[in-house]
Image (cartoon, rainbow, N blue to C red):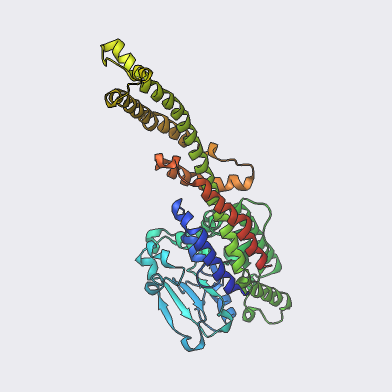
Amino acid sequence: MDAKELQTLLKNRIHQTLLPLFHKYNRDFSDLESLLKWKPIVLFIGNYSSGKSTLINELAGEEIQRTGQAPTDDSFTIITHDGADVAGEEIPGSSLVNDENLPLTSLKALGEQLISHLHLKKVATPLLTDMAIIDTPGMLDSVTEKDRGYDYMAVISHLAKLADMVVLMFDPLKAGTIKETYTAIRDTLPGSVGEDRLVFVMSRIDECDSSSDLVRSYGTLCWNLSQMTGRKDIPHIFLTCAPDSLRPGLDTTPWSQERDLLKNKILTAPKFRVFHILQDIDRQVNELQLTCEAMVQFSSQARRKLLDISKIAAVAVILAFFFSGLLSKFLFGFPEQGMLDALLQGEVGLAHLTFPLAAVTLIAMGFWIWLTKITFPSLLKQRLKNPRSLVILESDYRRHLWEKVEPHVIGLLQSAGLGQIFAAHSRNLKKIKKFLNQDLIEFYKKIR
């Protein structure tokens, strides 16, 4: 079974088993839905002089993107191959965000300014048959949403979630010092893409005047990355430059080899497509499971409260049915014969039932008001104050998931009604666990 067939099978299984549960618990399925569409994606980001377009042209084998020292393109450009007969065709953003077969429909919400800076290019490069490359506007040091006309970081976040690989490119003169680069690495990308999908590149190293300049630029980039990520261990950084930019007389072998390693790594993205989809499904289904576990516990606690009240109400109803007549006769002098007397004398009639049934009805109404106006709201208030008490967080992984799930659980509790007492959360939880423990493992085995 090839990757496309496996992706289709996975999509069908998700729709059959999990989609109703995502909807039931108001979980956003759009990210997963987008991942299951279309083809593998490699996203290129970096400042305007970092060599993105040069590397993309080299991968494609033709001059697709304009290159230069100054900003040459302020658009998000999707590049792929859909057959030689359509090479050269360009599709505007307005068509892309309205095509349900593409994972870009949610970009429509980011505004018309973005849509006008989005397009797709179809090229003659067969290498891109099974993947797409996205070139992005260069990151700037000082810019506001008003300057661009749209939320740049929101677009980067969305595209990073779709990408199987994100290539971050730097140049020696601005080694990680661009403000938008800092924001992307520090705040945007961690919530959108796993570290295993990030590739760091310092390009245009030929512009360093000497090896000491290169060492200083590399050290600066490493320092800045440690400040952005908050980590001391720095990921591998590819050092490279365009083949035609090397000075005559230099030994080009090391840089050519590094360039080839980088290109080969980028071209492996399609191989990991299904694995990345499974990773994201694994994470989101675990979030769904944690949400469901919280609601199972809340529902269980509410049922226990209902049971406790029901026991008291049952005793009160029995007493009222048999003894309300005696109590009323003692206090008010009527009825002449209560239900208990009538039973003992074997003379029970319709008239004897009227008073007991009225008493039972009043008591039942009283207990219902007690449940709906006091007991259930009190329980709900307690759990909203400490929703974490609804789940067991025995591992760092579950604690990390809970940080993202907790606001959603609070929203579900705030909208919870008495129907939660009888909701089938436990049955839903069994379905989720079955998918995680059986179906997902089955798919992981298929890609080994």
In the foreground, 176 or 266: 266
Identify the residue at horizontal 46%, vertical 53% (top origin): 27
Task: Answer left or right for 254 relative to 84.
Answer: right
Give the residue at the far front of this rendering. 346
Identify the residue at horizontal 64%, vertical 44% (top origin): 395
148 over 380 or under it: above or below = below
Residue 430 appears anywhere in the view: yes
In the foreground, 75 or 320: 320
x and y percentages locating residue 233 in the rendered image: 69, 54
31 over 305 or under it: above or below = below
Splitting the image into 4 quarters, where does residue 218 fall? Answer: bottom right
Splitting the image into 4 quarters, where does residue 437 fall? Answer: bottom right
Task: Answer left or right for 329 relative to 7.
Answer: left
Residue 403 appears anywhere in the view: no
Task: Answer left or right for 233 relative to 280.
Answer: right
x and y percentages locating residue 375 in the rendered image: 42, 30
Q: Which quarter of the rendering shows the C terminus? A: bottom right
Identify the residue at horizontal 36%, vertical 18% (top origin): 340
x and y percentages locating residue 173 in the rendered image: 58, 65
Q: Which quarter of the rendering shows the N terminus? A: bottom right
Q: How many marks?
A: 0
